[in-house]
Image (cartoon, grey):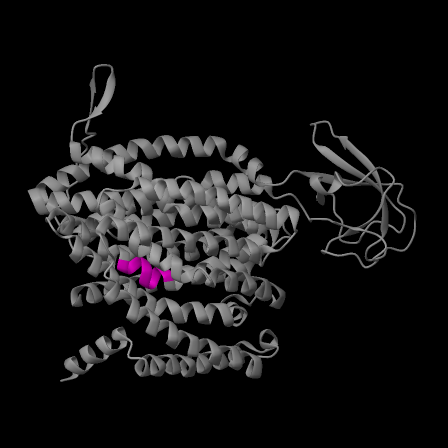
Amino acid sequence: MASLHKKSLIATAAIFCCRFTGLLREVVYTALFGATGALDAFLTAFRVPNMLRDMFAEGALSQSFTSVMSKVEKGEGPDAAWKMAHMVVAQLVSLMVCIVAAGVLLAGLCMQQLYPAKARIEIEQVPMAAQVEAPSATYLGIKNDAEGLPIARFACEGGSPAELTPQSVVRLSALQKLQPGDKVALSMGSSSSDASVPALRVEPRDYIDLAADLCRIMWPFILLASLSALSMGALNVFGVFGLPNLASAAFNLTTVIGGCAIGWLIDPHFGPDALYGFAIAVVLGGAAQLGVQIPRLRSKGYRPHWNIGLAWQAGRLVFTDSQVRKVWMLMIPGVIAAGITQTNIFINTSFALYLPAGAVTAISGAFHLWQLPVALFGVAVGMVVLPSVSRMALTQGGDNGIAEHLAQAMRFVAFFAVPSAVFLGIWGEEIVSIFFQRGRFDAAASALTGQVLAAYSLGLLGYAGMKVLQPVFLALEKPWAPACLALAACALSISLNYTFVHIFHLGASWLALTTSVVTTLNFLFYFFYLRYLLGGMAGRVLFPGVLRIFAAGAVLGIICWQTRELFFNDFTSWSFMARFGALAIGGILTGGIYLFAAFLFRVPELRMFASRFLLRKK
């Protein structure tokens, strides 16, 4: 167990650098572009290849490759493991070239499916009168222009709104509720100044073309990210956990520095066109993420060699190596299972496009903050658990050892995930304001993102637990149960999101709540199904420690809530230094209270860390 803790902490330190630079990337995005439709377009365009990266490359493919390669390396030696890796790389490159080509060709169609249909606004019979903030307008109907695109016609009685431009658009779904002759207020905000006249929300422009262009530029990133994920898996097999995670930091820094430089060359004022520079930087970042791992791969014995590992027999392609075939067979259900949360985020993004501008940005920013503790502990422990459990699965009678190993890993993760969920849930708006509230990202955007983050925090513990348990199904070669569950989870997510957005007309935080519900249900299924497969889950090791952690977390929650009510009033209106100082002091004091409560409740992880620290001091 000491080895698990040591390797997990190494991976945690590396992942912290990755996630911190990832937050820096989000800070730069929001500061330069704010919670606007333009940034929503960029994040939506990036979400498509990035979702495939998380599901396919860094999720199922990396995990299945690591599991099989660990067994080959243990049973047949490093040379056989690298021979298998050569074939997987060759097949992956061939597949990804086809996927990238299809993605570039279908980017426009994909964005059309995500974005709600909109019509350009045309003002007719505008009287010569003083303009007012939200004039009353008469809806005249829809006509098509020469290209067949819809145009919404209005006759404004008080003059055209000052912010209305030839690019202004309105959603067709909103126009379907109107009849010609109805009175509306053309509002650039979300509400009407006159309660007797319904408001029709006007958007400054339709960003679907921008999103399609950005998506085309960023599609090659998935090829580079997939190769980087294989490199990460191979290094994990040989006990290297720090560098592969630091490689993601190289991606983030390249994206920030390159994006700012290229974006400034395109548009020094960082208007929407500057996002083309950031899209180019995403591809450059993928190349950097792969490049930093190559020297260490060579030191472990990898030498590039093209071996496709396929043969044409009896009129069909067959694998020439059974272990390579096993990688892909494990990956197919793993793609479905590993993509539960990412699929939910993609679904959330598509539904958020029907909400006011800035909803996608709020979901993206909150998700990155939510992922920070999950990545630090859940992903790190899961990364260390997979190779060890894969080797344990080769020995007969190893189930009891696996169950105890997993129980200790989950307890270790809970020790950090519980206080993280408390902080993000109660101090969400305050934390968001520290990271993002600058430039064009204002206090209102902080409040919205904080609400989304609080909803995400409810599922943090379940998500972290999923990251620990999910790779075990690959190690045990039982991937289909999680895959079937993923399909049910996807259906539940779509149903809840549709209900919240289109029926009850609720905000972005409810989309995040859907993710929390789905991830928690998935964790519970993983836990009980593994308990069935292993004949138990070492409950005497797991439950007493977790209950003590929950008790300490409850004390922390009470203190954080009282601190927020007494000292953090109008927090987002303070200066940055005042906000940073207050949150830093509050975090240190409440964190100390959590540790003291953990000491009083005799939490095993705290006692283990303390004993190891004292032993090292001696």
* Lateral position of residue 309 relative to residue 549, left or right: left
Direction from residue 167 to residue 427 in the image, left or right: left
For the N terminus, the quadrant is: bottom left
Residue 291 visible: no
Quadrant where the C terminus sits is bottom left
Tally of marks: 0
As drawn, the residue found furthest toward the left would be 76
Is 598 located above or below residue 479 in the figure?
below
Give residue 511's position: percent from left, percent from top: 54, 53
- What residue is at 19 percent from the left and 55 percent from the top? 402
- The residue lying toward the viewer, choosing from 300 and 187, is 187
How far across and down, in percent of the image, does residue 275 sit?
52, 49
Magenta residues: mostly which secondary structure?
helix
211 or 175, which is in the foreground? 175
- Closer-to-camera residue (300/4): 4
Q: Is residue 443 visible?
A: yes
Q: Quadrant of residue 462?
A: bottom left
In the image, is residue 579 part of the stretch drawn in magenta?
no
At 52% from the left and 81% from the top, the residue drawn is 562
Magenta span covers which residues? 374-381
Q: Position of residue 98 (x, y in %)?
A: 36, 30
> Extreme right residue here?
128
Residue at image coords 39%, 43%: 485
Q: Nearer the viewer, residue 544 or 87?
A: 544
Please say if 551 is above or below 315. Answer: below
Residue 203 position (above or below residue 108): below
- Does 378 lie within the magenta span? yes
